[in-house]
């Protein structure tokens, strides 16, 4: 038994397993998104988010019980915590609204542009220096977003506008997370899940639909469970392997979205979406690789040769 435990611990600590765990986490996120798109076609937006949040909090409760109240009561930067939960709540409502009307791959393309928004806002909000290479990549990424929008007289439809607002909210939520590095992950997830649940409780009575079957109730609850599992897998992957190895794998979400959109909803990817998505992914990968290169240079100062 000891040998088995040691082997399991070795596997958990292995950096080679990190990418596999990250890929599984991305698959869980894609399943969550597909299930959410399916459910909001039959049930109210507030209703889906309320039940999803309750299920997620049930799964999270053992971790919260173990951690106690100290991390919650003593959370740092209360104002920034409030800003983050507002952004996270807006982001989740925008996402589920967008998937009601747009193909899953289109919505995922907008959300994958979030790192580009972060890079563009970093000089102004975080005081980070952005060189000309990254500015060029940011410009390419924005071109990709515009192509995905298909410039025309009908470009700024409500679902498209909501998608841009939601992905921007997600980007600024990522930036706020940089100010809250000292807050435990479970506390951050608790705050954002509770806030989404409260917002769902407010809006659910206005658009509540009777649950049609036990299967639907199970799927509504499973939505929160899958989302929590996805967050845990991604966090675990980042601990098992360095970010440079696993973070680029987030772009497999787009592949999953195309596959699930075609399988479950009959969505056929548009050429403009594929071109725009390609530019966004290329831009995001370049920005990430460039940031990792600069971090390594700062960590490893040049050796002075006598």
Image (cartoon, rainbow, N blue to C red):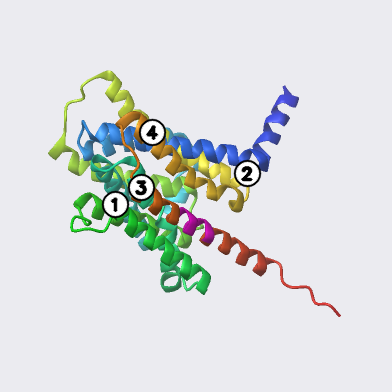
Disc 2 + disc 1, Cβ < 8 Å: no
- Tell which circle, 3 or 4, labels the residue nearer the N-terminal end: 4
Which stretch is magenta? 281-286
228 or 260: nearer the eye? 260
Disc 4 designates what residue? Answer: 260
Disc 2 + disc 4, Cβ < 8 Å: no
Disc 1 designates what residue? Answer: 163
* Residue at (54, 50) in percent of width and height: 247
- Tell which circle, 3 or 1, labels the residue nearer the N-terminal end: 1
Q: What distance separates the C-alpha of mark 2 from that of mark 1?
A: 32 Å
306 or 214: nearer the eye? 306
Q: Nearer the viewer, mark 2 or mark 3?
A: 3
- Tell which circle, 2 or 1, labels the residue nearer the N-terminal end: 1
Disc 3 designates what residue? Answer: 271
* Residue 305 image offset from top left, x and y in percent: 83, 77
125 or 259: nearer the eye? 259
Is residue 52 in the magenta section?
A: no
């Amino acid at each position: 038994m000891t040998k088995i435990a040691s082997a399991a611990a070795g596997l958990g600590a292995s950096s080679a397993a990190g990418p596999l765990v990250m890929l599984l986490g991305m698959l869980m996120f894609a399943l969550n998104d597909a299930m959410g798109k399916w459910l909001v076609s039959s049930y109210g937006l507030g209703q889906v988010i309320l039940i999803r949040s309750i299920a997620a909090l049930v799964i999270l409760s053992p971790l919260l019980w173990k951690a106690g109240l100290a991390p919650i009561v003593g959370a740092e930067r209360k104002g920034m915590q409030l800003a983050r939960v507002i952004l996270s709540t807006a982001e989740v409502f925008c996402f589920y609204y967008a998937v009601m009307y747009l193909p899953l791959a289109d919505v995922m393309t907008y959300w994958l542009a979030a790192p580009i928004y972060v890079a563009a806002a970093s000089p102004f909000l975080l005081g980070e220096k952005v060189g000309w290479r990254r500015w060029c990549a940011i410009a390419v990424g924005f071109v990709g977003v515009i192509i995905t929008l298909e410039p025309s007289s009908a470009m700024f439809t409500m679902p498209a506008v909501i998608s841009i607002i939601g992905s921007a909210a997600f980007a600024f939520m990522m930036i706020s997370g940089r100010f809250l590095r000292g807050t435990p992950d479970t506390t951050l997830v608790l705050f954002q899940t509770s806030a989404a649940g409260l917002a769902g409780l407010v809006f659910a009575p206005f658009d509540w639909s009777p649950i049609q079957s036990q299967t639907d109730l199970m799927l509504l609850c499973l939505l929160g469970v899958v989302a929590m599992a996805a967050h845990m897998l991604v966090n675990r992957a980042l601990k098992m392997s360095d970010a440079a190895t696993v973070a680029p794998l987030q772009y497999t979400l787009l592949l999953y979205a195309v596959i699930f959109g075609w399988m479950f909803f009959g969505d056929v990817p548009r050429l403009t979406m594929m071109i725009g998505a390609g530019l966004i992914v290329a831009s995001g990968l370049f920005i990430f690789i460039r940031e990792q290169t600069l971090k390594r240079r700062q960590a490893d100062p040049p050796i002075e040769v006598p």
